[in-house]
């Protein structure tokens, strides 16, 4: 089995004006596709990847053959992270978390605004390319960053939301203004999706 590029769960322009159609087309059709292609090239000849989602291997990286381990971490991580990313955003997002997730955010970070400040500061201070995440680990909420396409799945965490901080995620629209991109991104979060991952 080959891994496949998932279709976006909304139109390319659905996240306008916060994330432009141009960025979404490039990001999904070119960048994500390239991760899928390079992942498929890396696992060619390794039938153990048949019929298992890539997340399974990223959660159990000791199962990845040594010769292709870094390629799978890089490109498999890129495939998993982007598949996750498309789904934690939506058109007309910008609502707020509710219910048990909001209670947990209040408990861990003080309130929603304090959480957003802390998360944004973490995203702004990430050096180089990577991601900032809200995760649960042992039923506790944590903000973490990962370099490159490393995923919190490999650290025993369950991701709830994440922002892609590679320049390809915002440069055509925001150029070097990462802070504007981070601020805009809060408007497109699919909190219902985050909430359902949290309850699970
Ligand atoms: Mn990306």
Image: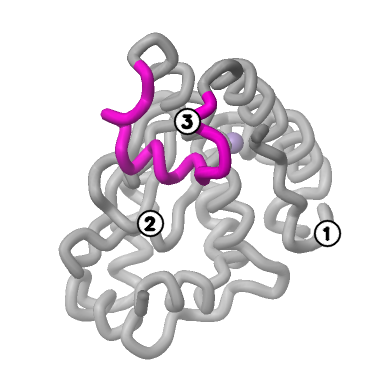
For disc 2, the marked residue is 159
Q: Quadrant of the C terminus?
A: bottom left
Q: In which quarter of the image is the N terminus?
A: top right
Helix, strand or loop at mark 3: helix
For mark 3, does the 10 Å Cα neighbourhood hold few (<14), some (14 to 19), or many (20 or more) residues? few
Residue 43, by quadrant, is top right
At 78% from the left and 36% from the top, the residue drawn is: 29
For mark 2, does the 10 Å Cα neighbourhood hold few (<14), some (14 to 19), or many (20 or more) residues? many
Upstream in the sequence, badge 2 or badge 1?
1
Q: What stretch is highlighted in magenta?
A: 47-65
Most common secondary structure along the magenta stretch: helix
At 51% from the left and 21% from the top, the residue drawn is: 46
Q: In this view, does 55 lie above or below 35?
A: below
For discs 2 and 3, the disc positioned in front in the rendered view: 3
Relative depth, front residue between 66 and 22: 66
Relative depth, front residue between 158 and 164: 158
């Amino acid at each position: 089995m080959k891994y496949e590029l998932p279709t976006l769960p909304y139109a390319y322009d659905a996240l306008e004006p916060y994330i432009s159609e141009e960025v979404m087309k490039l990001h999904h059709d070119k960048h994500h596709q390239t991760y899928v292609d390079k992942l498929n090239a890396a696992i060619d000849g390794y039938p153990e990847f048949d019929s298992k989602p890539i997340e399974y291997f990223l959660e159990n990286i000791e199962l990845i053959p040594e010769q292709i381990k870094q390629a799978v971490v890089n490109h498999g991580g890129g495939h998993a992270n982007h598949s996750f990313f498309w789904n934690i955003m939506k058109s007309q997002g910008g609502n707020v978390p509710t219910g048990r997730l909001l209670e947990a955010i209040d408990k861990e970070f003080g309130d929603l605004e304090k959480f957003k400040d802390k998360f944004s500061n973490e995203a702004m201070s990430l050096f180089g390319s990577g991601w900032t995440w809200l995760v649960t680990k042992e039923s506790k909420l944590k903000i973490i960053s990962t370099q490159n396409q490393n995923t919190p799945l490999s650290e025993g965490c369950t991701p709830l939301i994440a922002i892609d901080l590679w320049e390809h995620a915002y440069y055509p629209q925001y150029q070097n203004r990462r802070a504007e991109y981070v601020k805009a991104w809060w408007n497109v979060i699919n909190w219902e999706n985050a909430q359902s991952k949290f309850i699970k």
